[in-house]
Amino acid sequence: MPQPPVVLGIETSCDETAAAVVDGARRIRANVVLSQLEDHRPYGGVVPEIAARAHVLHLDGLIERAMAEAGIGFDDLSAIAATAGPGLIGGVMVGLTTGKALAAACGKPLIAVNHLEAHALTARLTDDVAFPYLLLLVSGGHCQLLSVEGVGRYRRLGTTIDDAIGEAFDKTAKLLGFDYPGGPAVEKAARSGNAKRFAFPRPLITRDDCNFSFAGLKTAVLHAVRELERQGSVTAQDRQDIAASFQAAAGDVIVDRTRRAMAHMPASGGLVRLVVAGGVAANTYLRERLTKLCAEQGGVFTAPPIPLCTDNAAMIAWAGVERLQLGLIDTLDAPARARWPLDPAATAA
Amino acid sequence: MKVLAFDTTLGACSVALWADGAVRAAAFRLQQQGHAEALFPMIESVCADAGTAIATLDALALTVGPGTFTGVRIGLAAARGLRLALRGPVVPIPTLRAIAATAQRGQAPQPVLVVHDARRGEVYLQAFDNALKPLGEPHVEPLTDVAIAWQGRVALLAGTAAPLLAAMWPAGVMIAGDPTAEGFGLPDARDFAGLAAEVLQNRGAAAFAAAPFPVYLRAPDAKLPTPRTP
């Protein structure tokens, strides 16, 4: 029997430097991530130049660690997969160039991976999900609903017309004076808050399409904070109530849009499969809402483990495995791309 | 011994393969952007021209800055990636020293001051003796200060800011190369590949076992947020 392919994955598109080794039998043989959180915290957000400088100093060491943990040498690899976009271009160039160097030196194929495709295919690594499925991709930079029909075959059903959901969480956290990164802080505060105290808007939920909007919700949070400041001070309870009310509104929008998208999906065996991916998929409240939605709609819900929802290299290596098996390899002049939509045919929302 | 040398730090991409005493193949391409796409196809074609498999290289040499931040990192990422697989020594060449090496090509050895236009009215500069030994660290300085500090002390001027500086001195000064020629003042791997091989032979591979580090000379453009006043 032929050995399953073994692929090294490299991820450097934002503020995590990561390397992983994954094989065609869906085994994660190594998965190391170095977060740059502390480098960016004083700035209240990711600074692209600081991120790129950190990637170039740490990536080679992380690759060595991943290879050692996997217990293999470069000759044992079938291919090298690196994120080629979309993302912060300076960081993407570091990872992609490192991948090209290894491919050239070892005589192995290079696979230039779309970071969003890697998120989209993660559920096939963790749960062996069959095509087609509905993907809800929620992160700091994206908020999309996609019909995943095959490797490289995506149909966008909806996207945000303004902010990504992760951005809305981070901006709300900033308004509430929480530390960066704000998403987890909002979720934590919301647990002790009254979600009914503030009647925040649910943008677009009466519309027939599957698009999202979060700018109005963010503005409503801003007004609520200003109003409380005008009346005196903003207490810890106020912050918790705003966080809970905001999260409930965001959850309603996500659930409504996803429900509509489910109706557009071909039901394989009578069931629609919903997969969630991206950094915001780490939010337990949203996971619970989506689990409930699937139960109501007779769908099947899959959410990869949280460390595989946030940025990681195992998903890049897995996307490499999937593409390699289809013969989809790249040349050493493969470009790094700041923008790279999964469905280039989709019209503007 | 086979040494692969490359530069991506400024407005060109260049690659050279040095083997047993001479450059065997080389390529030089002017480009402000696109180094990340151009570099590896150029490395492959230079190695093919020299009949050398990448896996059989003995050492690497690259310019490590100062230069464009992105350009510096592309070279660094390439060298660090190649080093993981090849396990050989890497000779870091300061970019201004590479420019000095190009300036001395075909000339009688003489001291050289390298000034590269760093924009914002500043230059990256470093001085070298006639054996290309650095006389001080590379640094960034306003052009007007350099004009005052170095007037009358320079035998040969090199780098993209050389014409700017020469124009500020009434007596003029000799400039290395033709300022109107394409690629003027830029490093070229064919000129520092041999220098790297010489350094490597003199100091031994063990001295270059570590991964190379970038030389940016400037901090990232990032401002700390001002705290909100309630």
Image: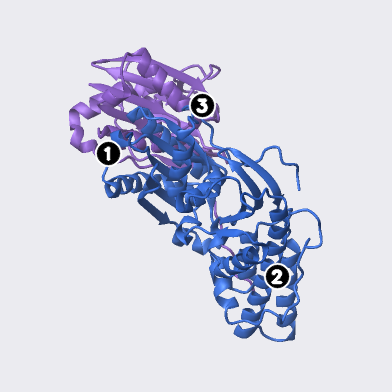
Chain colours: A blue, B purple
Chain letter of disc 3 in the image: B
- Give the amino acid at mark 3: Ala
Q: Is residue A152 above or below residue A294?
A: above
Q: Earlier in the sequence, mark 1 or mark 2?
A: 1
In the rendered structure, the answer to whether residue A197 lies left or right of residue A60 reads: right
**Camera-nearest label, 1 or 3:** 1
Q: Nearer the viewer, residue B229 or B158?
A: B229
Give the numbered dot on residue A40: none
Image location of residue B7, percent across then percent down: 42, 28
**Camera-nearest label, 2 or 3:** 2
| Secondary structure under the numbered disc 3 in the rendered image | helix
Q: Is residue A254 above or below residue A327?
A: below
Residue receiving disc 2: A249
- Give the amino acid at mark 2: Ala
Give the numbered dot on residue A73: 1
Mark 2 Cα shell of 10 Å, populated few (<14), some (14-19), many (≥20): many
Query: Which image quadrant for residue B59?
Result: top left
Query: Which image quadrant for residue B188?
Result: top left
Residue receiving disc 3: B166
Whole-number angstrom distance, CA of label 1 to CA of label 2:
50 Å
Q: Nearer the viewer, residue A65 or B1?
A: A65
Whole-number angstrom distance, CA of label 1 to CA of label 3:
54 Å
Residue drawn at x 67%, y 48% is A266
